[in-house]
Image (cartoon, rainbow, N blue to C red):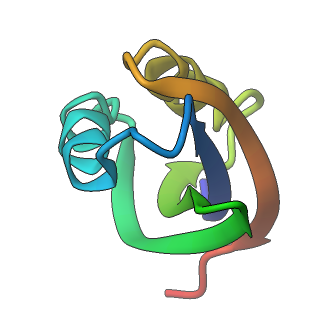
Amino acid sequence: MADVIAKIKIMPEGTDTNLDELKKELESKVPKSARLGGWGEEKIAYGLKALIVTVVVGDAEGGTQAVEDAFASVKGVQSVQVVGLGRAIV
């Protein structure tokens, strides 16, 4: 089974959400079936920034669903959306 790299956009609830604390909480929720690849931020509007996280998961059906569900359960997260998928080259 190959690996898939997923780029996931995480929208915080508001501009007052501490993104560093949110990252720590999200890191603690990553399922064992996935591993973190990196973090980024995307400016949205009026001081609001989204977190962009890259995760590596197996290419089984529903591969990112466990990660999406785990991230969505974190306090301070408004929405979670997969914005890109690609095959990991090893």
Q: Nearer the viewer, residue 40 or 87?
A: 40
Name the residue: 64% across, 37% down: 64
Residue at the limit of the structure toward the bottom, as seen here: 90
Q: Is residue 81 left or right of residue 14?
A: right
Would you identify the image quadrant in which residue 85 lies? bottom right
- The percent coordinates of residue 9 (x first, y second) are 66, 52
Q: Is residue 78 left or right of residue 86?
A: left
Residue at the limit of the structure toward the front, as seen here: 46
The number of callouts visible is 0
- The percent coordinates of residue 54 (x first, y second) are 52, 65
Name the residue: 56% across, 18% down: 69
Name the residue: 22% across, 34% down: 25
Q: Nearer the viewer, residue 61 or 49?
A: 49
- The percent coordinates of residue 47 (x first, y second) are 59, 62
Image height of 18 relative to 68, above or below: below
- The percent coordinates of residue 61 (x first, y second) are 77, 30
